[in-house]
Image (cartoon, rainbow, N blue to C red):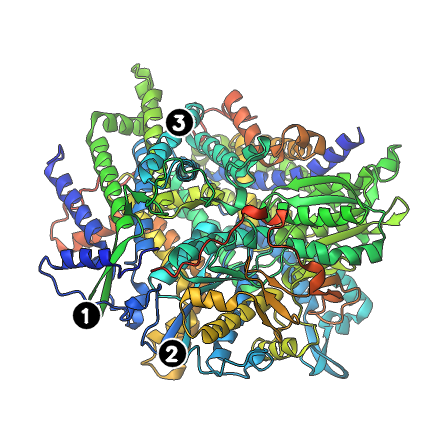
Amino acid sequence: MDDIILQTLNGLDKGSAYALIALGLTLIFGTLGVVNFAHGALFMIGAFCSVTLQRIFSTSFEMVDETQTDFLGNPLKVETPYVEAWFGPEIGAAMIDWSVPLAIFLAIPVMIIVGFAMERGLIKHFYKRPHADQILVTFGLAIVIGEIIKANFGANPIPTPAPSAFAGAMDFGVMLGFEPNAIIYPIWRFVYFLFSLAIIAAVFAFLQFTTFGMVVRAGMADRETVGLLGIDIDKRFTFMFGLAAAVAGLAGVMYTPILSPNYNIGMDFLVLSFVVVVVGGMGSLPGAVLAGFVLGILQSFASMNEVKSLLPGIDQIIIYLVAIIILLTRPRGLMGRKGVMEE
Amino acid sequence: MSKSNFSRRGVLKTGAIAGAGLALPTYLRADGHSGYTNAPGDSGTVTIGFNVPQTGPYAEEGLDELRAQELAVEHLNGEGDGGMLNTFSEKNLQGDGILGKKVEFVTGDTQTKSDVARASAQSMIQKDGCIMITGGSSSGVAVAVQGLCQEAGVIFMAGLTHSNDTTGKDRKANGFRHFFNGFMSGAALGPVLEGEYGNERQAYHLTADYNWGWTTQESIQAVTEGMGWGTTETVLTPVGAGDFSSYIAPVLNSGADTLILNHYGGDMVNSLTQAVQFGLKDKQVNGKDFKIIVPLYSELMAAGAGANIEGVIGSMNWNWQLQDEGTKAFVKSFGEKYGFPPSGAAHTCYVQTLLYADAVTRAGTFNPCGVAEALEDFEFDGMGNGPTLYRGSDHQCFKDVLVMKGTENPTNQFDTLEIVDQTPRAQVEYPADHPMFGGAEATLGTCNPGA
Amino acid sequence: MLGMNAKDTMLFVVVTLMVLLAPILLNPFPTDSAFSQFNAGYPALMQRFVIFGILVIGFNILFGLTGYLSFGHAAFLGVGSFAAVWMFKLLSYNIVPAIALSIIVAGLFSVVIGYVALRRSGIYFSILTLAFAQMMYAIAYSDLVGKMFNTIVTNGETGLQVYLDDPQILYSEGDPKLPHLFGWEMNDSFTWDVGGWSFVFQNGYYLAGICMLIAFYISIRIFRSPFGLMLRSIKSNQQRLNYVGVSTRPYMLTAFVISGMYAGLAGGLMSAMDPLTGAERMFWTASGEIVIMAILGGVGTLVGPILGAGAIKYMENIVSTINDNVVRGWFEFMPDGLADFMVTIIHPFIGKGWHLTLGLVFMGVVIFLPGGLVELGQRIGGLFRRKKSSDTPSGATKPAE
């Protein structure tokens, strides 16, 4: 029992990452009809917003300390971050410590600008082109973005720890009446789960309860009619692209303490998130979220030792196996509509 | 390429086709009859190939190898301060290249994929005329390129490859490994672990599901069980899984008090970071502090894991903090050129290049068979690892192994690991027909000069 | 000739000549010149040109004609090469049984996967093929089948290779210890030196080249056959076909299996050239590379796949080996400062940055040349001819929409 609760919890945070990326992908696909293979790259840009902010806060000036030596035997250069010098050591250290959550404020404008630039500069010209062309040009863009990140940050994963207040784990088992150590769950993952629920809720609320969102939904259902009504749907869709980029970016920012980012993190998530979107049903927002959590939890269960001893290696193929089964039993994924992306 | 371009058959065929009215064939590599692939002949230069990952997960490691290799070429050609040439126990290399020929190099990208690495090595051999290939950062690639060099008839000096198989069941007569292996890691870690953590522990293995992971787990498990530890569970994890939480979560409740992470590279960074997030390092199980062990450390991965490696024990082939003359000389020339200390991967590639050059000089020929003979059962010193033996029966180097620990209070960005112990060579030796190394069936085959 | 119309015959003859003379055509720079870096006429790379050419020609029969985008095609290449290496291990180094089996095995796999995946269309088909390929990759990478039966099937990440103690029951004394065709060794070659040039003619390359010509010929015939026409009509409107009572699935499955067998042949040839194979050949990026090659060359054209495969393999093997020293060599004639400046400019795009070049070239082609390199050729051709005619000597069909 405790194992099942434990793996469900593990599945939830994996699932929240899948769901957030898939949500952004579906927003873009549903509004603009574009298959965006650079979406993983947007997730990565978000993750590197964390790294950048951490770097900015840690930017230091050097003072030569004659009493110590570095690895070559020269006098050691002691580095003090500017923020510590400016705001005092305590506030400065706290800023560095909290750089990951603070990066949200950096990521939102950055991602919206990146999203706008991408849509206006590139994607716009591909609305009338076949889906295959969209996939390919965005895939090329993903390669280029990855290489630019690599040129600036190197190829190694970069440690981006959570604030020390959220480090470590809490013992859920004790709260539920199990023995100590039965259900241990890192605090930051719980934060991530709540964070993604908040984002998902905000996106749905925005689409459901605002006039803007209503128009966008109408546009998703029938773009031409909305256009005939004299509404500049294109402008709103561009905004939606920025919003989708921001969702992907925020998913990336907050994921960095769980997975140290490197330039390939976008590609790693890309294929999985596409499987998630398709399993959920192309163009269906609730489908994307549902599929994200379902696949995350199933993957966690498949990783259990009991399951692995019955079916060795099942954890490596479960996602694809489930995708095949779902697509064969439900032709358009869990919640897909007829006629989308089938031509 | 087991046939040279200059075999009798080749000559006859060439003649037949060229006889069809085209210009008379002349043979480019003029001394083709010297009987081995890419013989440099009368040319004043000799080309070696640096085949390292420049893209993909091990790109940083590969680029560090490349820096060290370029440094080695400088030193061989008499530029720079000579580095380890001054401390090497053999004094044949005078800074005038190899056998008086200036050393040139070409570079290639393995992408840490066997196919690409072989394509790149083939290009070096067929197009650039390389006489030796070195570098690499993964055992799968090392085994693949080693096999290719065997067929093509050039020497392969392996870079970072830690799997037992490279000089075990996949050993080849033309391939040589200076780096240590999983068995040696286990043998070196054993006594230290016993000393630090006692002999009543329960180990839980998470193992990357590929050949390196399997052999490392096998080696470590044999040692820990030998000193009385139990093994609670061994779990295989997908390579590149990213999120290891589902594998880490059950550890605490399994009765194990030690977690052994048979992971490398990005997997190691992620699994260690996540294990620390699960609070494993702060827990007590069976009345003991919970401990994490990482069998193979590298500086670059230690940097990637950040503060999480504090107090975590692992092993290394070499570290720049060693205090012997060879290490100091190498760290000085590398540090002055690039501004940071070299990694273990860089060291092994640097040493391999020098060892090759020295073996050629002692053999008096670039012929792979002569070079191999000069390297076999060769004893040397002054290269940072103390007295070292290149064993002839499996082409594996035997030397001291370092046991490392994540620094508790780092003073600068390079201060990630500290040396706990230097396990003497005698303790990590094993017979060449050891069952973990392919047993009695494993053979080097015969040396192939390509002609 | 051979049942081809004049235009196709012309195209076939041109391709044949290119394949036969590749060792010379691809070596335009003398060996010692600064630009010899750009020579691609060495056997290992030429083999890749033609083998990937076969692979993409096959892929194009599926994607170019029917519009079904398979995102898991590398899996068939992988099973083909594993089958061939197993033949080497069990029978002998003769490549005939190896290649035969690799085509058959890839064909069987594609029947099963095609039967299932073709129940869906559009992106659902793509994701199904991707899912199958990724599963096969995971199974091969960790040798899950082997583990289940406690033996070795794919030998995991290290890859499958031939050991000295393998049975090789058909081996007889005196046979070569490397892949051969009845004693004709794949690695045998001769070098022809003329002037500053040195041209290498290798058996393996010519064998693979002939296979590619056969594959190319079959592809021309398929393109021009009623069957090909049927496939095209599936692409333009499958629904209408269904309405008039034509069952399209048998046609689709046939196309899928044919392209799977092409991939199997390519896999078998890869093993025949270099008898080691690993799971990474089946990874999704490898499948993506096939798609990229097809688009880059020109989807739905006859000669596009060959051009696309060549262009990508050329970049992978040549651009990645250019390092700063080499670049400095090109600009030796310039003053130091200017040469350094040029090196700094070029530095991000070469060596470790070759992926950046790939990404940019690729985006450029998709944006400006939807018809790929074939379209580029047509446009250049159009510049030279006053009247831009729709027929070009390349015999290319209209690029796929």
Circles 1, 3 touching at the beta carbon (< 8 Å)? no
Q: Read off the residue under disc 2.
A: C339
Query: Element under label 3?
Result: helix
- Using the rendered image, report if marks 2 and 3 lie on a common chain: yes
Q: Which residue is at 62% across, 46% downward?
A: B435
Q: Nearer the viewer, residue C204 or C35?
A: C204
Q: In the rendering, at what x and y percent does residue C54 appear?
A: 30, 41
Q: In the rendering, at what x and y percent does residue C147 appear?
A: 59, 34
Residue type pointed to by label 3: Leu
Which corner quadrant of the image does residue C76 belong to?
Answer: top left
Mark nearer the viewer, 2 or 1: 1
**Which circle's residue, 1 or 3, is located before the other in the chain?**
3
Mark nearer the viewer, 2 or 3: 3
Q: Nearer the viewer, residue B100 or B305?
A: B100
Residue type pointed to by label 1: Gly
Q: Residues within 10 Å of mark 2 (few under 14, many from 20)?
A: some
Q: CA distance from mark 2 to mark 3?
A: 57 Å
Q: Is residue B355 above or below residue C153?
A: below
Seen as rendered, the residue at the extreme left is: B21
Q: Residues within 10 Å of mark 1 (few under 14, many from 20)?
A: few
Q: Read off the residue under disc 1.
A: C195
In the rendered structure, find residue C108 and report the number of the disc placed on it: 3
Residue type pointed to by label 2: Ala
